[in-house]
Amino acid sequence: MKTLTIEKLTKSYAKETVALDEFSLGIDQGGCIGIVGESGSGKSTLARILLGLESFDQGQILFKGLQIPPKKKKDYRDYRRDVQMVFQDATSALNPKLPIWKIILEPLDNFKEVKPSFIKEDGLSRKAVASHLLEMVGLEREFVDRYPYQLSGGQKQRVSIARAISLEPSLLICDEPTASLDVTVQFQILELLKKLQEETNMTILFISHDIRAVTFLCEKIVVLKQGIIVDHFHMKDLYKKNRHLYTKQLIKVASLS
Amino acid sequence: MKKGNATLFNLPITTKLGITLVSFLLILIFFGEWIMPYDPFQIDMNNRLESMSHQHWLGTDQLGRDIFSRIVYGAKLTIGLGVITIILSVIVGVPIGLISGFSGGKIDAVFMRIIDAILTFPDFILAIAIAGLLGPSLTNIVIAIVLVRWIVYARLVRSQVLELKQQEYILASKISYSSKWRTIRMHILPHLIPTIIAIGAVDVGKVILLISSLSYIGLGAQPHIPEWGAMLNDGRGYFQVVPALMMYPGLAIMLTVLIFHLLGDGLKNRFDIRKRGLRK
Ligand SMILES: Nc1ncnc2c1ncn2[C@@H]1O[C@H](COP(=O)(O)OP(=O)(O)OP(=O)(O)O)[C@@H](O)[C@H]1O
Ligand SMILES: [Mg+2]
């Protein structure tokens, strides 16, 4: 059974703006799936719908066999634990008034009974748990007491990732997590995501307008244009002749810049 | 000069002035009982309308009561009422603003209608009307003003919530399975509290003026109570003979309003600076 099945998902904001048009996709557990498309193609809309932050008009979404968003309280709770998100703008994703450790621990605090597998010892202080998560995303333990404004953009994005993986979700949705970072830092964040994916076997749904980032990270790639899937291929077929014209354009634009 | 090392000595002069004046007020409020040379209610018909002297620093009123003692006693009453009124307005207004901004939709629309309806009247007129309906007393004045004043906080909080709601950390909080209340406590209240305190401080000044005005026109404190507005009203009949009867309470009101204004402004600046620092 697929972990995530999206069937004919349709969402329009007004009569004219159809953000997603009969979008269908099946995703197995593990691996990285890339969704690429230009601005306004409906990528963020898809992410928000999958996270239950937005309603949709038609179609259905099944996550581990359950309708999204789940109606029953227990199912909803499991879904919240299992699907997490990394945002585009790390500055806006971290509350400036809170120290890093409080930010990171917000999800774990809501699931007191959860014992993450990366915590080997018993009776660790909350700050120690936060420091451990920081280490997992390649930051120094000392950062726990800092505030977001004392971190660089890339470091903030790592904090945001630490928070998202703290509950060990099986699906991690990343909506342009590297778009606001400079190129070398973008690469480091992608490497981190790749490493985390391999270690935990979670599924990463990686959304980006940058086909280079997507091809670096993902084995399977979906090309979205105005809410419609125009191309759907495996990474190794990227340069095959039968690629959709639009995909070829995206590759060309990316290699130019 | 090193940053973040502000001692009492290198603060700006206005802040120093503000701190001095506020401590002066606090002393009046908390140690007034010991400062007062006379019982502010003690009538002494043998010493009516006296001018300044060693016995009566600010003279006596038409019933021979010591004006200085009455002013000191009035400080606690007037400022206390102002502070209580604002605290009550915050208690009513903030939750309404939170609910309205956070839930949006119909609930929001209903609250906004109510607020718009109340706002069509100037708040002084409305307070007069409500106080007139409820009957003249200090409690009723406080109720009347709270019924008008909560709007300030409801609107302030609502607009800030609407702004904060766009922040992705609020979404992240929802995705983390935080309850609405936890999201508010963690991510919204810490942003609101400084603003509420700063605006509240200025508002205390405004409300003191409002309470005094209502007492002056006879809707608030009754004449024998040394609330400053009531004292003004009380001294009105003798104003031409003994201007001091109105001058001192008038001055007291003016100074207090000024102090709270300075205090609020100072707090606003301080919090703004921190905000800018945090947004870097
Ligand atoms: N809240 C909204 N109200 C109305 N229209 C919206 C809203 N959100 C998105 N849209 C519209 O839906 C379409 C898809 O938007 P979406 O944000 O999903 O695009 P995107 O692919 O994420 O673009 P970008 O790469 O710029 O982030 C756009 O035409 C956009 O204008
Ligand atoms: Mg987007």
Image (tube, coloured by chain):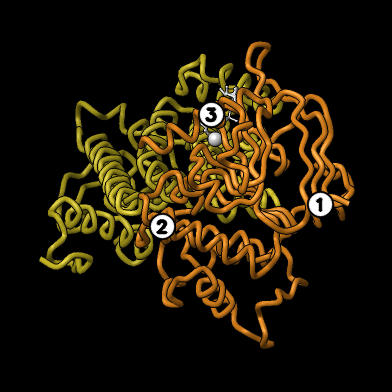
Chain colours: A orange, B yellow
Between the C-alphas of marks 2 and 1, the distance is 30 Å
Circle 1 chain: A
Query: Splitting the image into four quadrants, where does ligand 1 fall?
Result: top right
B198 and A171: which one is in front? A171
Residue A15: percent from the left, percent from the top? Answer: 68, 11
| Same chain, labels 3 and 2 | no
- Residue B54, image x, y percentages: 15, 58
Relative to residue B65, is residue A30 depicted above or below?
Answer: below
Q: What residue sits right under mark 3 in the picture? A: B148
Q: Residue B136's spot in the image, x, y percent?
A: 55, 30
Give the class, few, some or many, for how many residues have Cα within 10 Å of label 2's Cα (few <14, many ≥20): many
Residue A28 in sight here: yes
Quadrant of the image occupied by residue B227? top left
Q: CA distance from mark 3 to mark 2?
A: 48 Å
Say which residue label 1 marks: A3
Q: Residue at x 60, y 38 (%)?
A: A240
Q: Is residue A173 above or below residue A222?
A: below
Query: Residue B251 sits in which quadrant?
Result: top left
Name the quadrant containing residue A203.
bottom right
For label 1, count other residues whose C-alpha is less than 10 Å away and answer few (under 14), some (14-19) or many (20+): some
